Image: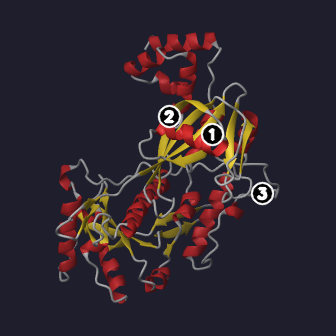
Amino acid sequence: MLSLFLSSTPTTTTALLSLSKQSFSRTLITMSITLQPHAFAANPLRSKTPNPNHSFSPISALESLKTQLLDATNHQPISPTFKVLPFRKGRPLASSVADDTTVFWHLGWISLADCKGFLANCGVQLSGDSLVYLGSRDEDDVVYWAIDVSSEGGLVTELGSKGLCFVELRMLMVATDWADQRAMGELAIAGHARALMEWHNISRFCGHCGEKTVPMEAGRRKQCSNELCRKRIYPRVDPVVIMLVIDRENDRALLSRQSRFVPRMWSCLAGFIEPGESLEEAVRRETWEETGIEVGEVIYHSSQPWPVGPNSMPCQLMVGFYAYAKSFEINVDKSELEDAQWHSREDVRKALTFAEYKKAQQTAAAKVDQICKGVEQGGQNLSADYNVESGELAPMFIPGPFAIAHHLISSWVTQVSLIGDEAQLRQLNTSMSNL
């Protein structure tokens, strides 16, 4: 981890040298996750690309799309090419490929012509207003779109015959190999698309006058159809604070359970921001309301898009913090939590080293493969995936690497503590000052 700082810019180095020992130690914690994006972050698609040869804005892409939809006689390849990702009830279309040892899932992109044909078979004419612009990549001449086909039940069978299936985004999330950059990119695209699809579903009417809304700018915003109103409506992001509460004196962390959690899983506290409230204030208020613990210092860690929350809030942003406790007696609000307890660093370390995450990932990937083959239609409950090969169950475990809670907790467990180690601090200061 120290190599991260030794490769810092002179400005960063100067700032780090001015930190107190405690602040420096906590900086090590908060920086440790920034080397790899969270799940659903680092979307490889852009709304505008810096390449001037194919800078497709949402409006220019929509105009080209409408031209291709209207020109039924032109069968020659046209630039840009369009690919479409269908969604059904919040589930993206996916496919699966298995070799001797590994199962890989992919997003089920289909061509514009195929999308038009599939819908025509269901008696539906594809229009530009039914597609939502997702973006394009720097390296190709392809523009990517999403479409909601929830009302077209006949597509399930037709697409299923081609090895494609609609899969819960949470299942794809668990089935994604954290080390697979390609899969992480596809998961980010699917999360972004699902958030937009769900936002369209809950913003069909103007909140000001009640009239219907119509999509604008290739589905990136909506507008009231009432000529006297014409209110512009954009996707909103609902921030959620998620915090690991730490007892610095006794070297332990506060973890909680909700009744909806799978057995033996513990996680961080979390809560919504109230109007007129800062993020730090929300951390302190939620911790006090749910556990009766008073929090003092609040340190930012990282943030994560979270499109798999409630459908009523499809564009959530998890904002992660460390919160240092000033009181330690727990008084659980049973309407919010099932339980909350202090856990030692060693107990949490054992929960992290438990080999349930890889097994869950492989089990979920196998389920995706079975669903795409038509063998398994339901069974998308992930509770049974968390077991060990021997059949013995760990006393506790925390959410897997797809969740920001995992990284809040693992960063705390593995932190390099420089507090009280004057020799190590002086050596690090000397190394950085010689850069």
Amino acid type shown at disc 3: Glu
The kind of residue tagged 1 is Ile
- According to the picture, the residue beneath numbered tag 3 turns out to be 389
Left or right of residue 425, residue 433 in this image: left
**Residue 419 falls left or right of residue 74:** right
In the rendered view, would you say 313 is above or below 302? below
How far is mark 1 from mark 2, CA to CA?
Answer: 13 Å
**Which residue is the site of mark 2?**
300
Q: Residue at x 28, y 73 (%)?
A: 212
Q: Quadrant of the N terminus?
A: top right
Percent x, y of residue 391: 81, 58
Which residue type carries mark 2? Tyr
Considering the numbered disc 3 on the image, is that residue within a helix, a strand or a loop? loop
CA separation in Å, label 3 and label 1: 25 Å
Residue 409 bears which disc, if any? 1
Tell me where residue 173 appears, x and y as whole percent: 54, 58
Q: Earlier in the sequence, mark 3 or mark 1?
A: 3
Work out whether mark 2 precedes mark 3 in sequence or the reverse, and give the earlier one.
2
Q: Mark 3 and 1 residues: CB-CB less than 8 Å, in contact? A: no
Q: Is residue 100 visible?
A: no
**Residue that appears at 44% across and 38% down:** 278
Badge 2 element: strand
Is disc 1 placed on a helix, strand or loop?
A: helix
Q: Does 419 sit above or below residue 97?
A: above
Label pair 2/3, CB-CB below 8 angstroms: no
